[in-house]
Amino acid sequence: MRPESPIALVTGANRGIGLEVSRQLAKAGMHVFLGARDPVKGEAAARALARERLDVEAVALDVTDAATIRALQPRLDSIDVLVNNAGVDYDTDQTVLSADLARVRRTFETNLFGAWTVAQACAPGMRARRWGRIVNVSSVAGSLASMGRGPPGYGASKAALNALTRLLAGELKGSGVLVNSVCPGWVATDMGGGGRPVRDGAAGVVWAATLPDDGPTGRFFREGRPLAW
């Protein structure tokens, strides 16, 4: 059963989709840990949401730094909803044949391994309590069904993140923990550079974070509709 007041963690949440997801989850009655690499920016974002009378608390979290994750472990044990939003480097300036592979590896450190590490820290507590939601913020750039030319590091890392979704969902099947990937679509963030309002992209993420107990797991969605892997 869903806890009366779920505790959520949103990574990469001091701006853009992560900030708006934090706002919407708090409005849905959750206590939200707003994760940010830069503690100053995280605190400023949390204060802005607190002025809206929302229950949001900033935490210093760099998903590529195991030390910051270990420092948060006592709090991570209590997480009911994890939104792996932290993501970097929409590398449209590269091609697969000319890509700087050191740069691609850095992209994987955040987009895949960062999400994987935080999931490892949070999922055991969810499984023990028999309830949880993990949402990996992905992209159609990572869909093998439609993949062609595109941002090579970003696309490959999001395809790998989708694979992680499937693996986690399989591992946690029957435990009350639902794991899904969500593409928020092209939204007006610093990375996206344009598109529809951030609140609309965030809504699809929040939908997956608030699924009922009989909701889907191991799936890929945009705006609540299935996408092809």
Image (cartoon, rainbow, N blue to C red):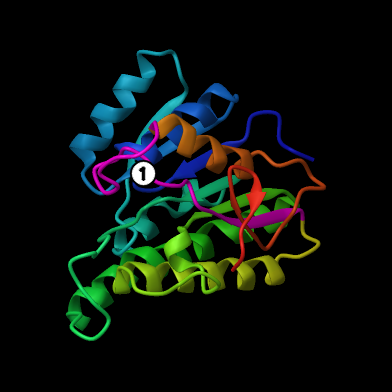
Nearer to the camera, 222 or 160: 222
Magenta region, residue range: 176-197
Would you say 190 lies left or right of 206 here? left
Mark 1 element type: strand
Would you say 3 lies left or right of 139 here? right
- Residue 196 falls within the magenta-colored stretch: yes
Q: Position of residue 69 (x, y in %)?
A: 37, 58
Prevailing secondary structure of the magenta residues: loop
Position of residue 13 relative to residue 172, above or below, is: above
Residue located farthest toward the bottom when viewing the structure as drawn? 97
Q: Residue at x 59, y 25 (%)?
A: 28
Q: Residue at x 71, y 56 (%)?
A: 128
Q: Position of residue 217 (x, y in %)?
A: 71, 58
Query: Hey, what amino acid is under mark 1?
Result: Gly
Which residue position is annotated with label 1? 35
Q: Quadrant of residue 206?
A: top right
- Name the quadrant of the C terminus: bottom right
- Name the quadrant of the N terminus: top right
Q: Position of residue 47 (x, y in %)?
A: 30, 22
Q: Residue at x 53, y 49 (%)?
A: 82
Q: Quadrant of residue 94?
A: bottom left
Q: Is residue 221 visible in this depiction of the protein? A: yes
Nearer to the camera, 151 or 167: 151
Q: Position of residue 166 (x, y in %)?
A: 63, 70
Q: Residue at x 37, y 34 (%)?
A: 19
Position of residue 210 relative to residue 27, above or below, is: below
Q: Is residue 79 visible in this depiction of the protein? A: no
Position of residue 195 relative to residue 121, above or below, is: above
Nearer to the camera, 133 or 198: 198
- Residue 130 falls within the magenta-colored stretch: no
Position of residue 186 relative to residue 49, above or below, is: below
Would you say 20 lies left or right of 181 here? left
